[in-house]
Amino acid sequence: MTARTLALVIVLVIAAGGGWLSRGWFEDAQRLTALEAAQAAASQALARESVIAGVVEARLATLDANQRVIDRGVIREIQKPIYRRVCLEPDAVRLLNDAAAGRAPDPADAADPLPGDAAGAG
């Protein structure tokens, strides 16, 4: 009986060790599967982002050319005079009216009478 009990104990120890070892292999396989899935997801995300980055780079290349054209337009607009004087001075209007009528302007003739003018008060 002792040999039989000893053999039974040895078989139980071997079975427990084998179960422990197989359980370790199973857990390692699960970890490896999870790691491979994470690496695959990361590589897919990296590939997707590189495609997006390529599209963005191509779009930025076209926008860069448009930006240069817009800058040139702004430079031209800044060089143009924005405000212009529409009205002329009264002396200039009098000169233009005299020229349109065909008469020479009188340099002694004032456009506006002076206040308190003695000659005009008579």
Image: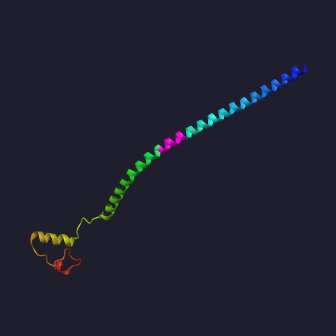
Vertically, is 90 above or below 20?
below
Q: Is residue 118 left or right of residue 17?
A: left
Report the front residue among 11 and 59: 11
Residue 86 lies in the magenta-colored region: no
Q: Which residues are magenta?
A: 43-50
Residue 44 lies in the magenta-colored region: yes
What colour scheme governs how the chains and residues are painted in the rendered image of this protein? rainbow
Location of residue 100 (image quadrant): bottom left
Can you say which quadrant of the picture contains the C terminus? bottom left
Going 9% across and 73% down the picture, which residue do you hit? Answer: 103
Give the x, y percent position of residue 76: 31, 62
Vertically, is 108 above or below 16?
below
Give the x, y percent position of residue 15: 78, 25
Going 65% across and 35% down the picture, which residue do you hit? Answer: 31
Going 11% across and 76% down the picture, which residue do you hit? Answer: 104
Give the x, y percent position of residue 68: 36, 57
- Residue that extends furthest to the right in the rendered view of this protein: 2
Vertically, is 90 above or below 5?
below
Going 81% across and 24% down the picture, which residue do you hit? Answer: 12
Judged by its main secondary structure, the magenta piece is helix
Q: Is residue 38 left or right of residue 120?
A: right
Report the front residue among 4 and 9: 4
Report the front residue among 79 and 55: 55
Report the front residue among 81 and 61: 61
- Residue that extends furthest to the front in the rendered view of this protein: 3
User: Number of marks in the image?
Assistant: 0
Location of residue 97 (image quadrant): bottom left
